[in-house]
Amino acid sequence: MNRLDHRDPLVFDTHELGRRPGSLRKVSRTLEAPAELGIADVIGVPEKSEIKLELRLESVVEGVLVTGTAEARVTGECSRCLEPVEDDLEVDFQELYYYPESEERHRAIAGDDFDEESEDETYRLEGDLFDLQPVLRDAVVLALPLQPVCQDDCLGLCSECGARLSDDPSHHHDAADPRWAALQGLSAAPGDEGDEE
């Protein structure tokens, strides 16, 4: 029984490929972005914004090799000055979705050497369907900057007042170092040596 819903725009059907190695099918699809496609509270593809997919589905002995490109608009905020950031993102990805019986065959061949952990990291077809969402999410997240900036030379915010330094690069505050504050009064006090009377 399949858990995947063929009506989901990120679920693809490989039925037309058959199981003939070398069979090829190209798919173009424009769809709405799923929720949480990015780095939370930093940068990502806004939910329900447009994503353009170009996929190449190729039947191989072990399963279906999916090679693709995704194009989307990403938004977030600058990590230095908190201004909004927007950019176009294009990511490439490739993943092999295994036929269910190829796992059983691999398990039989490997015997005691079968690695359960690496097997959990593989993607499998459910019937003739596969879900592209986890692969797309990984590709997008890995392509995003961990600390996005509005411009490469963004100066950030003033630590004293929060003003955006890129708007006024000469911005500064005349703040005395508190360690020297007690000495300030000594230099200007009348009666010091060197003062004229």
Image: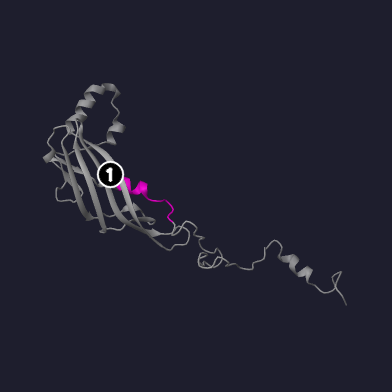
Q: Which residue is mark 1?
A: 135
Range shown magenta: 137-148
Q: Is residue 140 magenta?
A: yes
Residue drawn where x is 21% and y is 55% of the image = 31
Q: Quadrant of the C terminus?
A: bottom right
Residue 162 x %, y %: 51, 66
The vertical placement of 153 against 91, above or below, is: below
Q: Residue 3, can we see it?
A: no
Residue at 47% from the left image edge and 62% from the top image edge: 81
Q: Is residue 178 left or right of residue 124?
A: right
Is 147 contained in the magenta span?
yes
Q: Taking 162 as reference, is 132 above or below it?
A: above
Residue for point 75% across, 65% down: 183
Question: Can you tell which quarter of the image residue 88 is in?
Answer: bottom left
Residue at 64%, 67% in the rendered image: 175
Q: Position of residue 102 (x, y in %)?
A: 19, 29
